[in-house]
Image: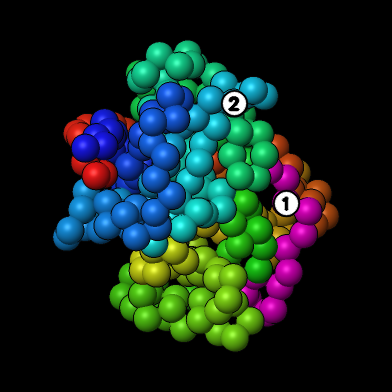
């Protein structure tokens, strides 16, 4: 029998299964098994699955799998949650550098261990088509401004864009957004989950940058975002079509732990 202790974390409703794999005990490369663990009826239930592993160039490495069991691109809320997990395990204190699929990320966490600020990679270009924007914030994103977001069928509308010929093979995350108060309301259809999630960290980051381009904003910008699962904050610097010092900030909370049998 092969058993592993797992921890469940969530960031603004974006939830993840995390295993401390510094001893490399978890060796299964089985997309079907990981998909089963992420299944909300037949498994633990999660938007993604992560391994925390040793790294020679950083405090730890984050290995991320989508809910379909396949290795994924950068996950912003997953990154924030694994930082909270690392602090909870005594691996880090209040700041860290960790390795993800898109390189080194810096992050800080408050003393309570529940609010994480994650630095994202620079974005050097945003393509636009009218009110629609395409960019990569560690994962590819499509951003569309809409007026009926509260009642929109995001699962259906998002799937129709994600499965267009242009995006079908590689996939793309689809974000629908509407302005509200001094920020934006965002709902996201995620590839790999193939459904709407309660929040998407790289997605809300993509929306904040795209809206800065849409509104021709320059300089230091702070954008509050409301997702279905909670509130997030994106801070960054915009200069022409270059975006730097990008920080994704929000809650990252422990939910429960347990043991899984992978025999």
- Residue occupying image coordinates x 49% and y 62%: 179
* Residue 75 in view: yes
Q: Is residue 108 magenta?
A: no
Give 83 or 219, whichever is nearer the viewer.
83
- Residue occupying image coordinates x 40% and y 57%: 31
Above or below, 137 against 7 in this view is below
Give 116 or 226, whichever is nearer the viewer.
116
| Circle 2/circle 1 CB separation < 8 Å | no
Crowding around mark 1 (Cα neighbors within 10 Å: few <14, some 14 to 19, many 20+) is some
Q: Quadrant of the N terminus?
A: top left
Residue 246 image offset from top left, x and y in percent: 65, 41
Give 183 or 37, whichever is nearer the viewer.
37
Above or below, 119 against 67 in this view is above
Query: Is 97 positioned to the left or the right of 158 in the image?
Result: right
Q: Depth-wise, is mark 2 or mark 1 nearer the camera? A: 2
Query: Is 26 positioned to the left or the right of 102 in the image?
Result: left
Q: Secondary structure at mark 2?
A: loop
Colouring used for the render: rainbow
- Residue occupying image coordinates x 55% and y 32%: 61
Residue 44 image offset from top left, x and y in percent: 22, 48
Quote the CA–CA distance across marks 2 and 1.
25 Å
Q: Secondary structure at mark 1?
A: loop
* Residue 255 in view: no
Residue 149 image offset from top left, x and y in percent: 39, 72
Magenta part, dominant SS: loop
> Which residue is denoted by mark 2 in the rendering?
55
Residue 71 image offset from top left, x and y in percent: 50, 54
Crowding around mark 2 (Cα neighbors within 10 Å: few <14, some 14 to 19, many 20+) is few
Give 177 or 192, whichever is nearer the viewer.
192
> Which residue is denoted by mark 1 in the rendering?
123
Q: Quadrant of the C terminus?
A: top left
Magenta range: 121-133
């Amino acid at each position: 029998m092969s058993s592993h202790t797992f921890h469940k974390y969530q960031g603004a409703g974006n939830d993840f299964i995390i295993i401390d794999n510094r001893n490399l005990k978890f060796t299964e490369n089985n997309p079907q098994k990981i998909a089963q663990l992420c299944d909300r009826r037949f498994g633990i239930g999660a938007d993604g699955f992560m391994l925390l592993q040793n790294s020679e160039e950083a405090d730890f490495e984050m290995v991320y799998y989508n809910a379909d069991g396949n290795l994924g691109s950068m996950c912003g809320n997953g990154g924030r949650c694994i930082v909270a997990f690392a602090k909870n395990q005594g691996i880090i204190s209040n700041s860290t550098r960790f390795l993800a699929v898109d390189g080194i990320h810096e992050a800080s966490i408050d003393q309570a261990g529940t609010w994480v600020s994650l630095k994202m990679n620079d974005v050097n270009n945003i393509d636009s088509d009218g009110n629609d924007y395409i960019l990569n914030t560690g994962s590819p994103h499509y951003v569309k401004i809409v007026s009926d977001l509260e009642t929109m069928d995001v699962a259906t509308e998002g799937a129709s864009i994600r499965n267009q010929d242009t995006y079908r093979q590689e996939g793309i995350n689809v974000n629908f957004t509407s302005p509200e108060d001094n920020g934006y309301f965002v709902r996201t259809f995620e590839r790999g989950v193939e459904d709407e999630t309660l929040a998407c960290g790289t997605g809300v980051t993509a929306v904040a940058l795209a809206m800065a381009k849409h509104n021709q904003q320059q300089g230091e910008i702070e954008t509050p975002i409301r997702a279905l699962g909670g509130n997030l904050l994106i801070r960054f610097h915009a200069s022409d079509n270059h975006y730097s010092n990008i920080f994704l900030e929000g809650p990252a909370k422990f939910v429960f732990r347990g043991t899984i049998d992978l025999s």
